[in-house]
Image (tube, coloured by chain):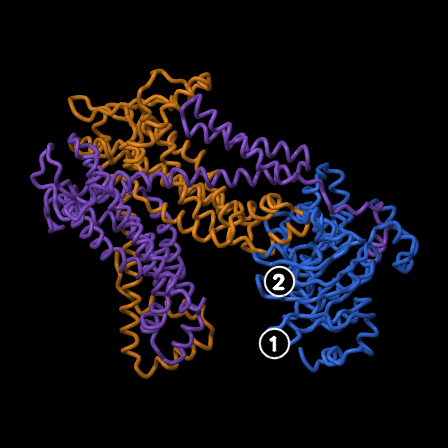
Chain colours: A blue, B purple, C orange
Amino acid sequence: MTVATTRIPEPRQKTPTPGTGARDEAGMTKRIEISGLNAYYGSHLAVEDISMTIEPRTVTAFIGPSGCGKSTFIRTLNRMHELIPGARVEGSVQLDGQDLYGPTVDPVAVRRTVGMVFQRPNPFPTMSIYDNVAAGLRLNGIKKKGDLDAIVERSLRGANLWNEVKDRLNKPGSGLSGGQQQRLCIARAIAVEPQVLLMDEPCSALDPISTLAIEDLIALLKERYTIVIVTHNMQQAARVSDRTAFFNLAGPGLPGKLVEIGDTEKIFSAPEVEATADYIAGRFG
Amino acid sequence: MSIVKTDTAAPPAEPKPLQLTRRSMPTWIPWAVAVAAVGVGLLTKAVQGNWALGGFFAGLFYVVVVSLASWQIEDRRRASDRLATSIVYSAFVVAVVPLVSILWYTVQQGWEKLSPEFLSHSMNGVGPRDDKGGIYHAIIGTLEQVGLAGLIAVPLGLLTAIYLVEYGRGRLARTITFFVDVMTGVPSIVAGLFVYAFWILALGFEASGFAGSLALAILMLPTVVRSAEEMLKLVPNELREASLALGVPKWRTVLKVVLPTAIGGIITGVMLSIARVIGETAPLLLLVGLSQSINTDPFSGWQSSIPLFVFDQNHSGSRFAPDRAWAAALTLIIIVMLLNLVARLIARWKAPKAGR
Amino acid sequence: MSTSITPESRDNAQRDSGSRRSPKADQAHGADAKPNKTQVRLGDRVFLGLSRGAGITLLVIMAGIAVFLVVKALDALGDNNGNFLTDSTWVTDGSKPAFGVAGLVGGTVISAGIAMLIAVPVAVGVALFITHYAPRRVAQTLGYIVDLLAAVPSVVFGLWGLVFLSPKLLGLHTWLSDYLGWIPIFDKDETGTTARTLFTCGIILAIMVLPIIAAVTREVFLQVPRAHEEAALALGATRWEMIRTAVLPFGKPGIISASMLGLGRALGETIAVAMVLSSSQEFTYKILDPGGNTIAANIANQFAESNDLGRGALIASGLVLFVLTLLVNGAARVVINRHKEFSGANA
């Protein structure tokens, strides 16, 4: 990224609305279609029979009470769920028509395509800020200093972090504040140019100001990525997401289920199911 | 800020086709290579007549061929993943083979000789041509020496740990912590030399079981301090505060609240440290002399001990000595293993109560 | 060394403990302590005195080790006609006693070095296997087995090494000298009939310290936060790449200190080497030939037959061993401290 491109005359000008046909055909961001998905921990069924479509280049928020399987479900979307011993998944998750759980699919390739940001900022403590962002690139065989420099800068700029860290790229990432660490993790995730970005409660460990910074960032990122975010914070879901999915437990000890999914405005103003309205009004959860 | 925002809106990189599947190696290939590797091993054994060499080449063949195949069929990254997996598995096999071999060989060699008679007789009056004698005197020596060492090291170590955790701040505590670390690294023979220089040369005592106990105590101390310290640190501060808030003086809080909470872990640590010193030979070689007959008094006269007995029989010219050495070695291993197992059982049994 | 407790030191202790507890608890303690002040003070005093005394005793022991070894060693060094640090003879009787530790230090370092070269990679592999490769249910059992093996007494290793292992290694000796003999250390003078060599000792030491290094390394690997491993996996790392990015860098200081612990054991190991090695006083770098000796094994072998001067000389050599292990521990500490900035401690 050169300086020249950053000096566009009208910096605050809104870019064209995302989701226009031309870009979709280019195939940068992908639609995710989930059907009949069950997720297990051993013999315990944690999430039951979920079917939904996640639109490209939108932010989809998952809300619902604690333990309703939101986090479990989001981890099935890049095959992180199966890393827990005994955990397994049934059903299909299709990314632009390709089943992530197909027999010849390489989970490593899936995770490279579907990036993830976690609840707690988890930069590699033994690495510098630069190396943290470059970690995924090095794995993918990008070793040349010039290439790395360019992508690291682009990713840090993309995560709204460049100006804060450009003078201390060689300092450990763990020396940053919590919010900066989380943006560093986002920079690390987008450095490998995934198609989808999953965020599992990315702000739950952050203070309000850092949270705001991340939310701003999400609004920018959705122009390039399909974003799925799990959040406990209803206002956050309302602020950042285009579509909202409400999850709930069928009952104590029973698996979590998808109650409804729709445009965020509609879910928050006129949900179809009463439980959703109750939850959003703060009557339980 | 605004500049940065424009950046993000920059046009996306050129679209890439979505590729989730990778060419992967058919599962039969590793198996086929494994079969071939066994063949290589057998061939090596036939030519060189050495099982170890055969195993080595079979393993090497498998690792190299599977990695190369993966590199050809799959890609470099998955080839290195397979290579690493094979190496990690091999490392485990390489580590376990000799260790299992020791246990198995000791059992095999020592099993026959290990009898109630062997355990209940000393070597008193056993000549080079007698297939008699046993380790009764050595068992007594070991029990007394290790017991005395424990009597010295456990209270001293436990109190030190209490000082470090409950009172210790400042320079003294830091110094003690540092020297406990240093002590952990003291070779057992050096501990033996110290007790020799101090107890025997400077104070003029004779070699005895107790001199050995002193050296063993020095070896036990750092282990006891360390493990007790760890356990005491695990006791939640709320417990101490609750007790202090009830008006219980600090020393009673430590004795009645903190110690009982940590006792399971402390016992485990003590038993593990006993298991460690019970097999020590080097310091005893310098300090307890060597006796072939029963001496129940650890404070005067020479004694024996099980590890010393093994060492001595190994040097003895009698053709019955090797059997006795192996039987004693087996006894020693059994004792050590039992101590370890009991220690772990205590740790497990006590663990839930520690509130972890 | 005085262990008596002055009122001042007691107050210090009070303050010290107070600074760690919450102020509330301290107040409560202070308020409630008043009614039966004398009683409390006596009990606390005695207890603090005992525990501090124990700590001080420990320091006295350490100081004693150093002082007594130095005094006795200096006695013997005064009668030495050779150069203690550069000679490798060991004559401690007769009219012109001369002894030096050069050969012994060489043998000690070589055998421990061989042990480290073999044990560290294998131990890291074992720790990785138990923590990241083996099925979880098996892993715990395997961990216990490794712990148990760390407890096998060295005299048993010595016996096994002498009777079982060294004959089996004779072939390997010949093979190595046949094919790698052009490398000086693998050069072999004797067409030997025995494998009681420094090389064999190194292998036995490796087997002995392996469980120790593996056990400590395993604990370190278990401490690697799951979040870091998941971060690597979510970037599309294979298992090995995840280990390289998240586990090994995090575990590096731990691996180093575990190795140093093992190295300390290998340097100081006495009985197994004394039983297995066919020793000589001369320094040899030819690890496939019998000969050479280590400090610890030399002490065990010579002690019984030595006169007073000989024992003093052995004490002096023991002091060298002590210093050697101290240096190793110190080096480990330096390395770990250097890594502190990039450690997980401040994460």
Instruction: Assess whether mark 2 and mark 1 are in contact (beta carbons under 8 angstroms).
Output: no
- Per the image, label 1 sits on a secondary structure element best described as loop
Categorize mark 1 by other alpha carbons within 10 Å: few (<14), some (14-19), many (20+): few
Label 1 to label 2: alpha-carbon separation: 16 Å
Would you say A72 lies left or right of B137 here?
right
Q: Residue at x 37, y 55 (%)?
A: B226
Q: Quadrant of residue C10?
A: bottom left
Would you say B246 lies left or right of C244 here?
left
Tell me, yes or no, if residue C68 can be seen here.
Answer: no
Instruction: Find residue C108 and report its horizontal and vertical position in percent.
Output: 35, 31
Q: Disc 2: which chain? A: A
Q: Nearer the viewer, residue B185 or A252?
A: A252
What numbered label is drawn on residue B227? none
Q: Which residue is mark 1?
A: A252
Split into 4 quadrants, where in the image is the N terminus of chain A? Answer: top right
What numbered label is drawn on residue A40? 2
Instruction: Find residue A169 and report its horizontal and vertical position in percent.
Output: 69, 47
* Three-letter code, disc 1: Pro
Which comes sooner in the sequence, label 1 or label 2? 2
Q: Is residue B241 above or below residue C120?
A: below
Split into 4 quadrants, where in the image is the C terminus of chain A? Answer: bottom right
**Total residue callouts:** 2
Q: Nearer the viewer, residue B320 or A209?
A: B320
